[in-house]
Image: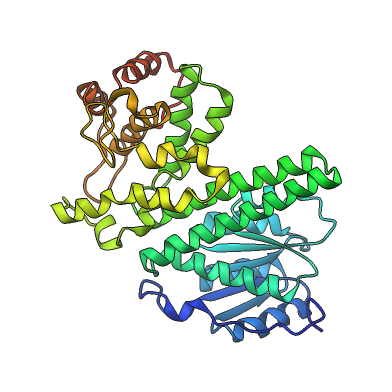
Amino acid sequence: MRLSGQPIKPCKSPISERGSSVEGPVSVLVVDDSHCVRTNFQCLLEGMGVRMFGAATCGQALRILEREKPDIVVTDLHMPKIKGIDLLDRVQSRLPYATVIVLCGKNSQVKVSEVIRRGAWDCLEKPIQGDALTEAMNGALEQVKLVSGGTSPKERQAGVSTRIAQRKTAEETAGEAQEVHGYSPASYNDLENAYDITIEGWSRALELHDRGGAGHGRRVADLTLGVARAMDIDQELLVHMRRGALLHDIGNLGVPDRILLKPGKLDDAEYAAVKTHVKMGYDLLSPIEFLRPALDIPYCHHEKWDGTGYPRGLKGKEIPLCARIFAVADVWDALLSDRPQRPAWTRELVREEMASRSGRHFDPEIVRILAEHLPAGSIAFPEDG
C-alpha cells in the first residue's frame, strides 16, 4: 500500500553534491503511528541515499532525537499522548538546526500558517501524493545544505528564489480562485500570512548560516518599525518595510563563506565581494512582484547620507526614507551584537557612535528621533549583546 495509491518514484538526491560541512549521510526521523506511512517513507528515502529512523510514538521520537540528532524530522500532527505540534516545539528547542515537515489530515483544525509559524519547513496533507512527498523531501534536503553552508553561493541563491517563487505562485493561484469562485477574504488572508511566515523562515535560515547573526533579522525589523511608527509612517508602508528588513541581507547567499564568516578585517578584494550582496539581493527579489515594494531596503540600506555609500552613491533624501530608517536600526543592532570580526559594543559606546555618524552616514532627523524616543521607551530596542 502506498500513500497515494501509486508507486513513489525515487529521485536523484541533491545530497550527493553537498559540501563537507555536513559529515556523513543526512539522517531523517519519521514519526507516525502508521506502519504503512513509515514504510513508504523508507522506500522513498532509500532511493535518495539518506538514513532513516522510524518512531511510532513521540516518546520514541524524543529518545531518537537525543541519540541521533537527525537533520530532518517528519512528524504526523495527530499522535497519541504527545501531539505532533508539541513535538515540533520540542524539536525546535533541542535541535534548532533541524528541518521539520509536518503531516496533517484533510480536516485538521490546525492551520498551515500556525504550523509554519512554529518552525516547520513544510506541511503536507494526507493522503500524500508521491510527487508532493518527493518535492518536499528534496526541499528539506536543500534546506539542510543551506543551513550547513554545504552549497555554493549560486546554489543557495537559486534555492531561496525557487522557494519564494513557489509560495508566490500558490498565492497568486489562490487569489485568482478567490476572484473567480468567491473564496472568503479570510482564506486569502491566511495564505498571505503563510507567505509572510515563509519570509520569516528564510530570515531565520540566513541567521543560522551567519554564525554571528542569530536573531538579527527579527530584531532589526522590529526596531525599524518602531522608528517608523514614531515618524507616523503609513501602515501599508510598514508591511513592506518589515518584509524588506527581514530579507535585507539575502544577497549574502551569493558571497563566499570564507569571506562572509572571516574573523578579522577584510582586505579590499574581500570587501568588494561583500558589497555585491545588495545587487545580488535585488536580482533575487525583483522578479517577485509581491516583494517589489519592499526592495528599497535590501537595495539601498548601505547608501550614506553624505553620498559615500553603495551601490549607487545616493545622497541625502535621494535615499528612500525606509532605507534611511533601516540603516540606523541595522547599525544599532549590529554594533550591539557579537560578529565574526569583533565583539559586541556597550550600549553607551553605540549611542556615541550613532551620534558621531549623524549627517555623514545617517539622516540627522532619524538619529534625532532615535535619541528622543530611546529614553522615553516608546521604541522597543534590543538588549545589549
Please say if 227 is above or below 249: above
| Nearer-the-camera pick, 65 or 355 | 355
| Nearer-the-camera pick, 313 or 33 | 313
Q: To which quarter of the image does residue 11 belong?
A: bottom right
Q: Is residue 147 visible?
A: no
Residue drawn at x 35%, y 53% as measured from the top left: 252
Please say if 382 is above or below 157: above
The quarter of the rendered structure image containing the C terminus is top left
Left or right: 101 as drawn, with respect to 77:
left
Left or right: 247 as drawn, with respect to 117:
left
Q: Position of residue 379 (x, y in %)?
A: 45, 21
| Nearer-the-camera pick, 381 or 299 | 299
Q: Position of residue 179 (x, y in %)?
A: 79, 43
The quarter of the rendered structure image containing the N terminus is bottom right
Please say if 359 is above or below 136: above
Residue drawn at x 61%, y 78% as measured from the top left: 53
Q: To which quarter of the image does residue 352 belong?
A: top left
